Image (cartoon, grey):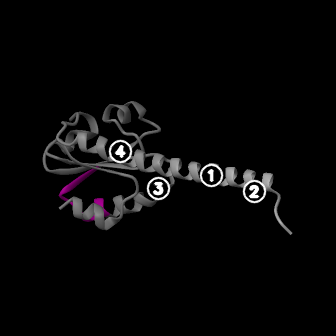
Amino acid sequence: MSIPEPLLKVAAIFFDVILVLIVFSLLFVFGIRVYWKWKSSRMKGQEIPLEGEFAKLKKGKGVIYFSAPNCRPCMMVDPVVKKLSKELKRVHFVKVNVAEKPELARKFGILATPTLLIVKDGRIEDGLVGPVTEGVLRERLK
């Protein structure tokens, strides 16, 4: 029993379309990740506004943690940030809920949650976009 030629052509076109969609979706995801990395590298060295809750970040090390209440990756990072805020007394932690303060997220150029900005003496030293482990965050805070 052989497969009719028109059906083989349709199947070949279908698999070509699927392959193209997979390639473009992978390029899109990796492109977004590269863009986030580039954007966070541009933020390095910028001064942060030292008013309100950010006043305690004027001296020493600190972390600004941008999260959203309905963000699954944020729910994974929350316990890590809470644990490190209790352990590392010399590091100040500020949590910003982007759902309540979207203008603040826009001001910092936050594109995704969770985002952690590591601050030293009132200037952005590093930015981490996406979920991070305790080890990675601890290493960046040294």
The tag earlier along the polypeptide, 3 or 1, is 1
**Contact (CB < 8 A) between labels 4 and 2?**
no
- Please tell me which of labels 2 and 1 falls first in the chain: 2
Which one is in front in this view, the residue at disc 4 or the one at disc 3?
4
On residue 36, the disc is 4
Label 4 sits on what residue type?
Trp
Badge 2 amino acid: Leu
Question: Mark 1 is on which residue type?
Answer: Asp
Residue pointed to by mark 1: 16
Q: Which residue, given by chain and number where applicable, does mark 3 sit on?
A: 73
Q: Nearer the viewer, residue 56 or 132?
A: 132
Q: CA distance from mark 3 to mark 2?
A: 43 Å
What's the CA distance linking mark 2 and mark 1? 12 Å
| Nearest to N terminus: mark 4 or mark 3 | 4
The crowding category of the residue bearing disc 2, from other C-alpha atoms within 10 Å (few below 14, some 14 to 19, many at least 20), is few
Measure the C-alpha gap from mark 4 to mark 3: 16 Å
Q: Does residue 22 sit above or below 97 in this rendering?
A: below
Task: Say few, some or many: other residues with alpha carbon within 10 Å of mark 3 (under 14 / 14 to 19 / 20 or more).
Answer: some
